[in-house]
Amino acid sequence: MDDVLILGEVKEGSLDLKTLELMGAGKKLAGELGGEFSLLLIGDSVSEMADEALPYGPSKVYKLEHPLLQGFKADLWVMSLEQACREINPKILLMSHSFMGMELGPRLACRLNTRLTTDCIDLSIDPGDGLLLRTKPVSGGNAISVFKCSGEPQLATVRGKVFAPAELGEANGEIVDIKAEIDESMIKVESLEIVREEIVALDKADVVVSGGAGLGEEDGFELLEELREALSKSFDNVMIGCSRVAVDKGWISSDHQVGLTGTMISPDIYVAVGISGAIQHLVGMVHAKKIIAINTDPGCNMLKVADYGVVEDYEEIIPALIEKLEELS
Amino acid sequence: MTEIRIIVCAKQIPDPEAPLSDVSVDAEKMEVIVDAPQVISPFDENALEAAVRLKEEGGGKISVLSLGKKVSDTVLRKTLAAGADELILLEDDNFENLDSHSTAAALAGAIRKIGEYDLVLTGRQAGDWDSGQVGLILGEMLTVPCINLARDISVEDGSVVVKKSVPEGYERVKAQMPALITVSNEVGELRYISRTKMLKMMRGARSIPSWSAEDLGVAPEALQKMGITALSSPPDMGRDCQVIEGSPDEQAEKLAAVFQGLR
């Protein structure tokens, strides 16, 4: 039986950073259990990544390759993962709280009749019974809860950027091939096409100008765009963000959404315009170095977490601000 | 084509948009105390909106299920005002603080009791525990196709076609019905419901059925609670906010100087 198994993910032909972080977490937990950790890679061709993973210290890298596993077809992936778990029989299984992990985790938990905790920010072993203690923000981030659940494997999805990536060392592990019995008849959800969209990379922004319900209308984002352009003369990577409500209202696409179910960011400057600051939004931007809030409600959450606040209608302030910025630049 | 039957699972929770000062943590009792009105979890409202649009396009019947120890029909009647045809409360003392697996098992019991259906829609995650599991586990339990993170849903000749959010944009996927779909907020917010319509629905004589664990054929001993071992407040996020005063012009000038200083 393996102690800790990590489900790896591949990004642009290489191990995803989140996988390195998971290996960091896996190494820590294996240490607490006095055991070892291993890595599982699933895909149509993962040999190179298996070699790449060995120096990070897994005792085994399980390689599950199948031509049908090209691209992410959830039905086949969950089937493969289920079969791999039954074969490897890990005590603990960790995956990223990524697009894939969010879908695979609950479905796998049901199939293996175990209990999953999602989006964990800390993990440790209860020395009393050897079970996994899963720390997770709940209530949008208003509280931090520690869960302990029955079932095997002990299953968690892990938030990105909370564990330090595993460090490179000596490669003493071995690569083990495992097979999955899958075929096309198992695909219940057929992919018709993937439509690529221009996605704003908010996590790479130095400055984010963000709008919410307080903008009152879609046109408000035009004014924010003008502010973005004005700030771009003095700052690099100025991007437009938004709250969940702005997406719900159809004012802007969801790649701009900041928060728990959007992008979690920590830019140099975050300008919140007409965003009252629901907790699920705050947890996504509160680590910004400087926060500037423009809001008509002096009692709103956003002004409590901001460094600078302006209590005024944004339509009054922003055109004047753009003018002043132009004068200064 | 016959009209489709849609089941929407909607959870009642304390308003997750409540001001921070209205939320506290009782570490001893391990409870989050939110001094705010009860609402329908936001992503579940998105799911209801998706259902109502499907009904408008091709006709159909919408049943809303809401599970808890005690569910307020005054909160949930909003779903009827928005366009649902039927509201069924799943209430039982044993339904308190269930884990995701047990919640899904109880919902699956209710869906089997309803019998025929084409689509089950849930929000992508609930605004209280943010777990994001019940929908997908429910799909597995019902052994129907599961589609996660829908931003658009349409029905074509007995199949459902969904635009599913993926990291690079969206994926158009197709599945046979019945199917389970978790809905994300890109679908759009629940339509505006006029006060008159809301009041009419509140005062309506219509009785709302309530089903217990026994009605669902779920054995209480099969239900597990969430295994919480500790609950604490998050680190304080507050900062010492400097409020910029003056006329809009003066405020703008001072704010421009702040930006200058941060360059």
Image: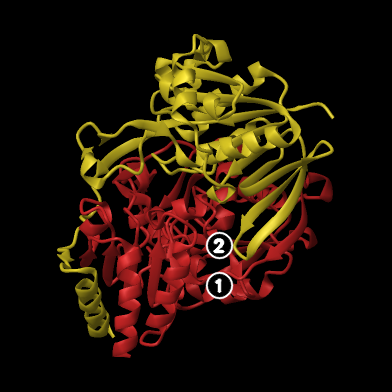
Chain colours: A red, B yellow
Q: Position of residue A185 (x, y in %)?
A: 83, 45
Q: Position of residue B90 (x, y in %)?
A: 50, 19
Q: Which residue is mark 1?
A: A53
Classify residue A131 by image quadrant. top left
Tell me, yes or no, if residue B226 can be seen here: no
Q: Residues within 10 Å of mark 1 (few under 14, many from 20)?
A: many
In this rendering, position of residue B250 left or right of residue A79: left
Which amino acid lies under the numbered mark 2 shown in the image of this protein? Leu
Tell which of B59 and A176 is nearer to you.
B59
In this rendering, position of residue A153 left or right of residue B160: left
Q: Which residue is mark 2?
A: A39
Tell which of A251 and B17 is nearer to you.
A251
Farthest bottom residue?
Answer: A329
In this view, B76 is above or below A228:
above
Would you say the residues marked 2 and 1 are in contact, meaning their CB atoms lie under 8 Å apart? yes
Q: Quadrant of the C terminus of chain A?
A: bottom left
Which amino acid lies under the numbered mark 1 shown in the image of this protein? Ala
Q: Position of residue A289 (x, y in %)?
A: 27, 72
Give the residue displayed 15% in from the left and 67% down from the top.
B245
Secondary structure of the residue carrying numbered label 2 = strand
Give the residue displayed 50% in from the left and 54% down from the top.
A247
